[in-house]
């Protein structure tokens, strides 16, 4: 009798997440993901993503761009929000309505119902790209959450403690999932350990995008 082949099981969708860190799996269903992707392509055409500089001088493996009144940027001058794209001198494209709709839908039933982002940082992860553990701390008011919409490839997301050395929990996030990080978890280290190339369910979308909404000012 042939040996029993056990299917490879996904890790559990979400471990015991800390207070203030919330996952809303499948918040954008298939049609909404397509709408997000169409809107995103117009943003990418106006403001193509580029690798950015990290402290210490290296470059991110994820490429970044922004939409909204303010965009997060990093170069020799440091980490900051800018009203214009330093690569082109143009204002960032506006945040598309499809983006704002999903943020509104998710935050309406969250501890942050009035969340109104003025910045959307867009990260693109091609094959092998990842993001090390870091804190989001360039915003004026840490009482405001960070809201992340996942689009494209599945990824292994890390949420750690308040020191970089704290061991992170790792869990899988998929296209259409939305993550909220606020309250007691607002300053947790977090990052993306791995992107599972070729798993995007969105037609014509190769790779992973994260749309991370912030209230910068
Ligand atoms: O890509 C992600 O899901 C995380 C993005 C992130 O941590 C950031 O932009 O600060």
Image: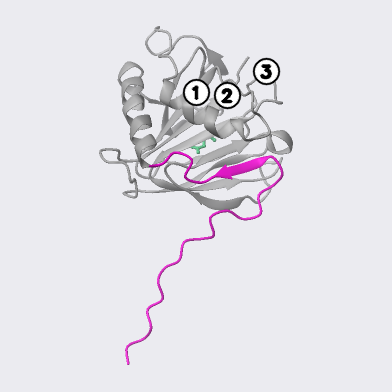
x, y percentage for residue 203? 27, 41
For the residues labelled 3 and 2, say whether their Cβ atoms are less than 8 Å apart.
no
Q: Which residue is mark 3?
A: 140
Q: Which residue is mark 2?
A: 214
State left or right for residue 203 relative to residue 62.
left
Where on the picture, by quarter, is residue 7?
Answer: bottom left
Point out the stretch of residues depicted in magenta: 1-29
Q: Is residue 6 magenta?
A: yes
For the residues labelled 2 and 1, say whether their Cβ atoms are less than 8 Å apart.
yes
Camera-side residue: 78 or 140? Answer: 140
Q: Going 65% across and 42% down the picture, which residue do you hit?
A: 21
Where on the picture, by quarter, is residue 181?
Answer: top right
x, y percentage for residue 40? 36, 26
Give the quadrant of the N terminus. bottom left
**CA–CA distance in space, label 2 to label 1:** 6 Å
- What label does residue 90 carry, if any? none
Disc 3 element: loop
State whether residue 65 appears in this view.
Answer: no
- What label does residue 120 carry, if any? 1
**CA–CA distance in space, label 3 to label 2:** 10 Å
């Amino acid at each position: 009798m042939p040996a029993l082949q056990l299917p490879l099981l996904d890790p559990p969708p979400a471990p015991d997440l800390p207070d203030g860190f919330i996952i809303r799996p499948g918040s954008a269903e298939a049609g909404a993901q397509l709408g997000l992707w169409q809107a995103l392509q117009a943003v990418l055409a106006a403001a193509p993503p580029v690798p950015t500089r990290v402290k210490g001088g290296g470059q991110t493996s994820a490429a970044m761009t922004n939409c909204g009144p303010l965009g997060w940027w990093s170069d020799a001058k440091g980490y900051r929000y800018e009203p214009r794209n330093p690569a082109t001198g143009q204002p960032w494209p506006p945040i598309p309505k499809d983006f704002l709709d999903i943020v509104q839908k998710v935050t309406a039933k969250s501890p942050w119902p009035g969340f109104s982002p003025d910045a959307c940082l867009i990260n693109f992860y091609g094959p092998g790209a990842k993001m090390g553990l870091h804190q989001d701390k360039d915003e004026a008011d840490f009482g405001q959450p960070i809201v992340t919409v996942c689009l494209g490839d599945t990824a292994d997301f890390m949420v750690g403690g308040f020191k970089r050395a704290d061991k992170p929990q790792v869990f899988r996030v998929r296209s259409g999932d939305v993550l909220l990080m606020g309250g007691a978890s607002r300053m947790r280290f977090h990052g993306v350990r791995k992107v599972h190339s070729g798993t995007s369910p969105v037609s014509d979308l190769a790779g992973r995008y994260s749309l991370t909404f912030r209230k910068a000012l």
